[in-house]
């Protein structure tokens, strides 16, 4: 194994040790393996870390552009390389983080598409439709109610355990990015749907997960995404709706109804207020659309 490949493995292990999610470590690993492949000519090893200079990094960036990758994708890959060099700099392997010397591509400001409250409610209410003949409608409705009513990430929902539920006070304890914990209130409909599901949830020995799959194991992120996509396709004819669509709707609808931006930041578990502020742009866009449609001077 080359020296650079060894450093990649050490860096990924360090990311996992510091509490980064499995998905983050996997995504960074994939990007870094692509970087290793680019630096490895046929039948030869990549250069040692100290020999990688600014010119090499710029040539690698140019190759990404030549393959037609978007600015968002290139930014993510560059973040992985910068993280690797930051780690190697800290460990004394390289004298400078050369990846920080290249300019970050500007990503277009794309606002998330947000379902209206009527669209969300119609989708959730449709889960219980008998004509769909799905095997676990009570569980599936509880999943959608919590995604929208609590604004949790799909990984947070999949990671919920029974002892994370305060059913009397209607709170959830969720573990977000970087294993940070926060408490999220459960609105009435979400709490009712959860109670109906828990009343029929199979008792599986030593299985603490709230949501179970058909085998009695923990329902995974992928499983929840599949459930959301299934109902969105059957009921809305829109397979592009995903679990995060409910989180966007949760934040946007709270803001539209007068909730404080700082409070929404806490509820969502955002580390930076700037991440939450994108919902003000969505709300403003919706407001302008209403004005254009209704105002006589528009």
Image (cartoon, grey):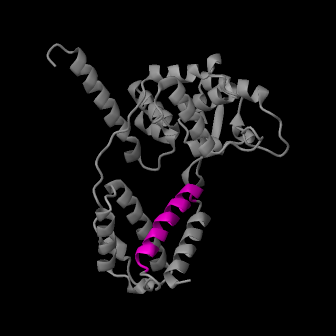
At 72% from the left edge and 39% from the top edge, which residue is drawn?
A: 213
Quarter of the image for residue 10 reads bottom right
In this view, the residue in front, 223 or 266, is 223
Looking at the image, is 88 positioned above or below residue 193? below
- Residue extending farthest to the right is 205
Q: Is residue 221 magenta?
A: no
Q: Quadrant of the C terminus?
A: top left
x, y (%) of residue 265? 46, 41
Based on the picture, tell me whether residue 24 belongs to the magenta stretch.
Answer: yes
Classify 128 as above or below 252: above
Q: Is residue 255 above or below residue 206?
A: above
Q: In x, y percent, where is residue 140?
A: 64, 30
The magenta segment is 20-40
Going 52% across and 84% down the picture, which residue do you hit? 2
Residue drawn at x 61%, y 39% is 224
Q: Residue furthest front?
A: 42
């Amino acid at each position: 194994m080359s020296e650079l490949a060894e450093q990649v493995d050490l860096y990924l292990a360090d990311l996992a040790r510091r509490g980064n999610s499995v998905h983050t470590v996997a995504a960074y690993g994939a990007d870094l393996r692509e970087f290793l492949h680019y630096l490895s000519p046929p039948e030869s090893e990549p250069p040692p870390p100290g020999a990688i200079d600014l010119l090499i990094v710029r040539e690698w960036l140019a190759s990404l552009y030549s393959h037609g990758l978007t600015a968002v994708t290139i930014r993510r890959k560059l973040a992985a390389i910068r993280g690797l060099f930051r780690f190697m700099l800290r460990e004394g392997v390289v004298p400078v983080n050369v990846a920080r010397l290249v300019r970050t591509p500007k990503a277009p400001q794309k606002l998330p598409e947000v379902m209206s409250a009527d669209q969300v409610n119609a989708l959730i209410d449709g889960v219980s439709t008998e004509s769909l003949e799905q095997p676990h409608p009570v569980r599936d409705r509880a999943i959608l109610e919590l995604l929208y009513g609590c604004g949790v990430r799909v990984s947070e929902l999949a990671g919920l355990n029974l002892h994370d539920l305060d059913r009397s006070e209607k709170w959830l304890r969720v573990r977000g990015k970087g294993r940070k914990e926060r408490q999220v209130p459960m609105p009435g409909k979400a709490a009712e749907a959860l109670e109906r599901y828990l009343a029929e949830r199979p008792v599986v020995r030593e299985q603490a997960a709230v949501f179970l799959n058909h085998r009695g194991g923990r329902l995974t992120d992928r499983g929840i995404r599949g459930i959301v996509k299934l109902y969105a396709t059957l009921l809305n004819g829109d397979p592009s709706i995903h679990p995060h669509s409910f989180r966007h709707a949760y934040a946007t609808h709270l803001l539209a109804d007068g909730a404080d931006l700082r409070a929404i930041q806490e509820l969502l578990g955002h580390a930076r207020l700037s991440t939450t502020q994108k919902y003000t742009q969505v709300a403003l866009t919706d407001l302008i659309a209403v004005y254009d449609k209704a105002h006589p001077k528009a």
